[in-house]
């Protein structure tokens, strides 16, 4: 039976995972996977990482009847001039913003509320979480201690031992704390 923490970490199928100050690395990975699993997932994922659709400048023929001849002018692409593919990307841009905001707590939401694009929100959250480097260093130290003390428990099955080992290795890799020395010993 899953614990409340498991449910919190995984999120729900209809909702992205929630971010807290200790789980940014896993949250960002899960959020991107969640985004990809949604309808228009590739477009949502693209909007988060690369920014929204940028409307084109459309040329218009100039007015030859003017005193000063203007050969052509430009206007910003209107909704009527958008292709179906472009409309889908604009819709995905809105869904990307919504997806990220659903995974944020009130205090973090307040700091990104003025952002206009999903990419801007994504980068601001990333920057905010880098401010928690002390927590990251503490987590790194904890993972290294866990690695150094890792042994089998008395009466533990090989499957349980292997599962704990894989979880520790995944935590080390995911948090980019997988030392070359450890890798060379495997």
Image: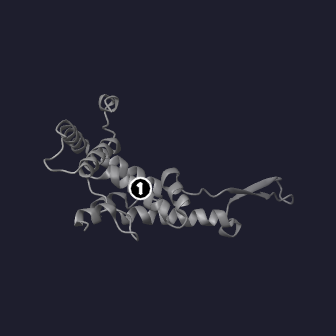
Residue 49 falls left or right of residue 173: right
Residue that appears at 51% across and 60% down: 44
- How many C-alpha atoms fall within 10 Å of the one at disc 1: few (<14), some, or many (≥20)? many
Furthest-left residue in this view: 154
User: Residue at coordinates 54% horizontally, 64% vertically from top-left?
Assistant: 92
Q: Which is more toward the observer, 157 or 101?
A: 157
Name the image quarter holding residue 141: top left
- Picture layout, residue 132 above or below residue 41: above
Where residue 184 sits, quadrant-wise, is top left
- x and y percent of residue 59 in the render? 75, 56
What is the basis of the colouring in this image? Answer: one colour
Question: In the rendered image, which residue does mark 1 sit on?
Answer: 121
Q: Determine whether 33 is above or below 84 in the image.
A: above
Question: Which element carries disc 1, helix, strand or loop?
Answer: helix
Residue at 59% x, 62% y: name it: 89
Instruction: Identify the residue at the far right of this view.
Output: 65
- Is residue 119 at least partly visible in the picture? yes
Residue 12 in percent (x, y) is at 36, 68
Residue 147 in the image, given as x and y percentages of width and height: 22, 38
């Amino acid at each position: 039976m899953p614990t409340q923490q498991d449910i919190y970490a995984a999120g729900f199928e209809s909702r992205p995972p929630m971010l807290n100050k200790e789980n940014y690395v896993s949250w960002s990975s899960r959020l991107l996977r969640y985004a990809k699993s949604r309808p228009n997932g590739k477009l949502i994922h693209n909007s988060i990482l690369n920014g929204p659709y940028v409307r084109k400048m459309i040329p218009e023929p100039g007015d030859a009847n003017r005193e000063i001849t203007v050969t052509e002018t430009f206007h910003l692409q209107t909704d009527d001039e958008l292709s179906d593919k472009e409309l889908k990307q604009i819709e995905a841009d809105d869904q990307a913003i919504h997806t990220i905001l659903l995974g944020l707590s009130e205090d973090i939401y307040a700091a990104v509320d003025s952002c206009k694009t999903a990419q801007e929100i994504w980068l601001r959250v990333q920057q905010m979480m880098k401010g928690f480097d002390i927590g990251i260093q503490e987590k790194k130290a904890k993972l290294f201690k866990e690695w150094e003390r890792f042994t089998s428990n008395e009466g533990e099955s090989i499957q349980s031992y292997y599962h704990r080992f894989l979880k520790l290795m995944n935590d080390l890799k995911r948090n980019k704390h997988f030392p070359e020395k450890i890798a060379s010993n495997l």
